[in-house]
Amino acid sequence: MKLFQNITSFYKKTNATIVVQNLLTIQVENGQFDADPALSARILVDQVWNKSPHLFDGRFGQRPHKISIAAAAFSNAIQDQEVGRLNKSSFAICLGKVLDNVAVNGKLYPLNNLDMEHLDTASRIYASVTEEILASPLAQEIDSLMEKADGSWDAWFSEYKRSAGEHNSGLAPMNGGGVSLIDLMDEEPMRRAHRDGINPTSLGKELAENFDPTKMDVA
């Protein structure tokens, strides 16, 4: 029984670590985080898990979902007094993306009471640290970092359109210009995919293969 519990814990930790790593990788690509995202992710998940193992290892019958473990890992790191201000800001940005994901997709996840506890705590910590950052001299630097993130959106969106047009001529730029049907669509789902670190080439190909102009949702 103990062996089975350990295997399940390893599986849960691995899945949560991948979520954390993916978000940190985006921060690295945007120039907002300069540590190894894979190593950092393992450390962050291990730290919060080892701090309160009873909240994660299922000893009371429930285990949290990977998304709430990721939220707990980032919120715990934010509270670490030894974390530098820039890293704290990066972790806050990542936590914000996790909470946004839950707000949009939470109904699709099998969340339990333990998840709600982790997410509630993470939300309060996020609100607190966001207020702290905005009230500090670091706010201007954070604004600059967010501008870099917006710049990465342009490159992501261009690749998404290129891939879609390559696999479906109906989505290619019209009249040889730079505008395509994709530019007429509601871009919020695509911005959400960008924030979640989804590969634009693969997503563009998926759109091309499933595109139905009669169901096009325009902005």
Image (tube, grey):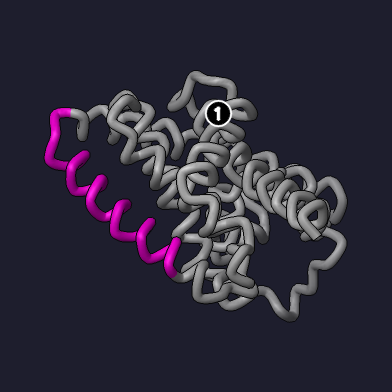
Residue 154 percent across, percent down from the top left: 54, 39
**Magenta run includes residue 133:** yes
Residue located at (44% from left, 61% from top): 118
Residue 56 appearing in the image: yes
| Left or right: 106 as drawn, with respect to 123 | right
Residue 177 appearing in the image: no
Q: In which quadrant of the rendered view does residue 191 lie? A: bottom right
Residue located at (79% from left, 50% from top): 7
- Taking depth in this image into account, of 121 and 210 the one nearest to the observer is 121
Residue located at (79% from left, 73% from top): 212
- Taking depth in this image into account, of 80 and 165 the one nearest to the observer is 80
The residue indicated by pointer 1 is 40
Relative vertical location of residue 72 with respect to residue 23 in this rendering, above or below: below
Locate the N terminus and report the quarter of the image it occupies. bottom right
Relative vertical location of residue 59 with respect to residue 172 in this rendering, above or below: below
Relative vertical location of residue 55 with respect to residue 81 in this rendering, above or below: below
Determine the main secondary structure of the stretch shown in magenta.
helix
Residue 90 percent across, percent down from the top left: 40, 34
Residue 34 percent across, percent down from the top left: 49, 19
**Magenta run includes residue 32:** no
Q: Amino acid at mark 1?
A: Ser
Kind of element beneath mark 1: helix
What is the span of residues highlighted in magenta in the rendered image?
Answer: 117-137
Pointer 1 local density, CA inside 10 Å: few below 14, some 14–19, many at least 20: some
Residue located at (61% from left, 34% from top): 42
